[in-house]
Image (spheres, grey):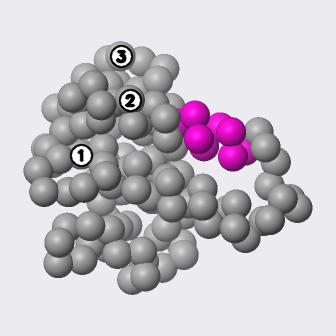
Amino acid sequence: MDFLWRLFVSKIKRNGKGLIDFDRMKVDSLVVAAYTSVLIGCAIKESSANKYALLEVPGWNVVPLIQVLDYFIVCHEEADQGRTVTEDFIGSLTEVLSLLKELLESGHGGDTGNIRA
């Protein structure tokens, strides 16, 4: 879990307020960060041991995972306009996004400090 978190953090760009600056992110970094969010979400869904291992990772914070995955979903929906992205694909991403939001709401979101969802 530590590796996935470090990979995710290495791909995001933040502004002066600590929020993700999507305008400064390259497309390939966004894709890697989004799919890393999905991998983390799936890992904690499948195993409570993974969830608790993630909570022990220094600097762990679910908020940027939520921000990236939400942005990624919106980009897909806007680019696709109902033509090629299947409902199953968006549904799967949305399911993981909901799981990450539940983690935040349950108080297991990590060090959310000054970062807003």
Amino acid type at circle 1 is Asn
The residues bearing labels 2 and 1 have C-alpha atoms spaced at a distance of: 13 Å
Percent across and percent down for residue 58 are 13, 44
Q: Mark 1, mark 3: which one is toward the viewer?
A: 1
Which residue occupies the foreground of this view, 35 or 105? Answer: 105
In the drawing, does residue 79 fall left or right of residue 40?
right
Magenta residues?
A: 89-96
Q: Earlier in the sequence, mark 1 or mark 3?
A: 3
Mark 1 — residue? Answer: 61
Prevailing secondary structure of the magenta residues: helix
For the residue pair 1 and 76, the one nearer the viewer reads as 76
- Asked if the residue under mark 1 is in contact with the one under mark 2, i.e. CB atoms within 8 Å, the reply is no
SS class, disc 3: helix
Residue 52 image point, x, y percent? 25, 23
Q: Residue at x 46, y 50 (%)?
A: 36
85 relative to 78, above or below? above
Occupied quadrant, residue 107: top left
Label 3 belongs to which residue? 48
Q: Which of the two discs, 2 and 1, labels the residue nearer the N terminus? A: 1
Label 2 belongs to which residue?
102
> Which residue is at the far right?
83
Q: Is 88 one of the magenta-colored residues?
A: no
In the image, residue 92 lies in the stretch drawn in magenta: yes
Q: Nearer the viewer, mark 2 or mark 3?
A: 2
Of residue 78 and residue 50, the one placed in the foreground of this image is: 78
Residue type highlighted by circle 3: Ser
What residue do we see at 41% from left, 36% from top?
A: 100
Tell me which amino acid carries mark 2.
Glu
